[in-house]
Image (spheres, rainbow, N blue to C red):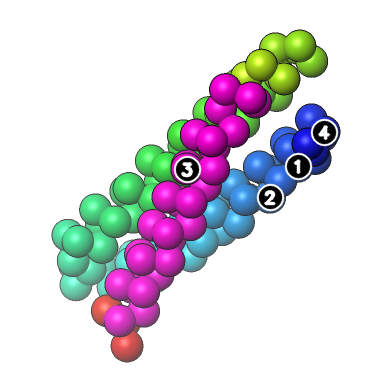
Amino acid sequence: MANRQEIQSEMEKKLEQGEKTVEKLKAQMSEAGDEASDELSDALAAAERQLEKGKAKLSELAAATDEEFDKLWEASKENWKKIADEVESGWASLSDKVKSYFS
């Protein structure tokens, strides 16, 4: 099992990557203005919600004592994987929608 620092570092990297992706897509949609569809806006909002869930989980883990961390990580690692997978698939889907919209 990875240690606490490795787990938190990996979570931070994924969240950082997600934030950059969301910001890039927001900028593209902003450039499109009124032409951006509701579907794209809804997909972006969903990606942002998943990103916020990930940030909340990271904050919870970072604030935990070592004993609490182990218990929290054991209870939440599958949920974190699910959040990370949903965020990544949401970004991929959103990215594909944006790419097709702007091409």
What residue appears at the point 46 percent right and 37 percent down from the top-left corner?
Answer: 52
Residue 82: which disc?
3
Q: Amino acid at mark 1?
A: Ser
Left or right, residue 58 beside residue 40? right
- Residue 103 versus residue 67: which sits nearer the camera? 67
Q: CA distance from mark 4 to mark 2?
A: 16 Å
Q: Which callout, 1 or 3, points at the residue further toward the start of the chain? A: 1
Q: Is residue 74 magenta?
A: yes
The residue at which mark 1 appears reads as 9
Query: Disc 4 and disc 3: Cα gap in Å?
Result: 20 Å
Q: Is residue 59 visible?
A: no
Q: Kindly identify which residue carries mark 2.
A: 13
SS under mark 3: helix
Q: Nearer the viewer, mark 4 or mark 1?
A: 4
Cα–Cα gap, marks 1 and 3: 18 Å
Hey, what amino acid is under mark 4? Asn
Identified at 79% across, 30% down, the residue is: 4
**Marked residue nearer the N-terminal end (4 or 2):** 4
| Mark 3: few/some/many CA within 10 Å (<14, 14-19, 20+) | few
Q: Nearer the viewer, residue 61 or 100?
A: 61
Quarter the N terminus occupies: top right
Front of the two marks 1 and 3: 3
- Residue 49 location (% of width, % of height): 38, 41
